[in-house]
Image: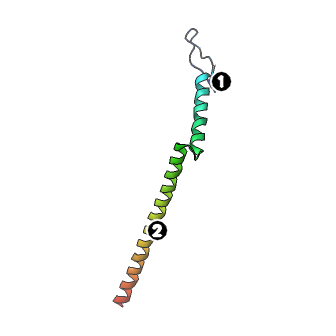
Amino acid sequence: MLISPPDRVAGRWTPIELSGSEPVQKAKQAAQRARVAVTDPENPVGKAIQDGVAAAKRRREELEAAARSKIQSATNGEENKKGVAE
């Protein structure tokens, strides 16, 4: 990655190579460690993420089942009202 800050002496833009710089390398290494931690089920962070995703899936299934139940009971209630009115 090249960026070009102004050269203070000449007032011109001079490219600076960042891909090999120490801060960039440290950031890349930290990102790689984070990726490993997140995907490793033995790592506490990875386990917490997996547990959270599993809990969210269970909750979504519960909410969808409750919604289906309400829709079904509402539909059945309308059918019962039609039968009584006739």
Q: Is residue 13 left or right of residue 73?
A: right
Percent of width and height locating residue 66: 43, 68
Tell me which colouring the rendered structure shows. Answer: rainbow
Badges 2 and 1: C-beta atoms under 8 Å apart? no
Residue visible at 38% across and 80% down in the picture: 77
| Outermost residue to the top | 9
Residue visible at 55% across and 45% down in the picture: 46
Tag 2 residue? 65
| Outermost residue to the bottom | 86
Q: Which of 19/13 is in front?
A: 19
User: Compared to 6, does 82 lie above or below?
Assistant: below
User: Compared to 27, does 65 lie above or below?
Assistant: below
Label 1 sits on a secondary structure element that is loop
Are there few (<14), some (14-19), or many (20+) residues within 10 Å of tag 1?
few
User: What amino acid type is highlighted by mark number 2?
Assistant: Ala
Label 2 sits on a secondary structure element that is helix
Q: Quadrant of the C terminus?
A: bottom left
Are there few (<14), some (14-19), or many (20+) residues within 10 Å of tag 2?
few
Percent of width and height locating residue 28: 61, 31
User: Compared to 83, does 68 lie above or below?
Assistant: above
Residue visible at 64% across and 27% down in the picture: 1
Q: CA distance from mark 2 to mark 1?
A: 53 Å
Q: Residue 79 occupies which quadrant of the picture?
A: bottom left
Residue visible at 44% across and 75% down in the picture: 72
Q: Earlier in the sequence, mark 2 or mark 1?
A: 1
The tag on residue 20 is 1
| Outermost residue to the left | 85
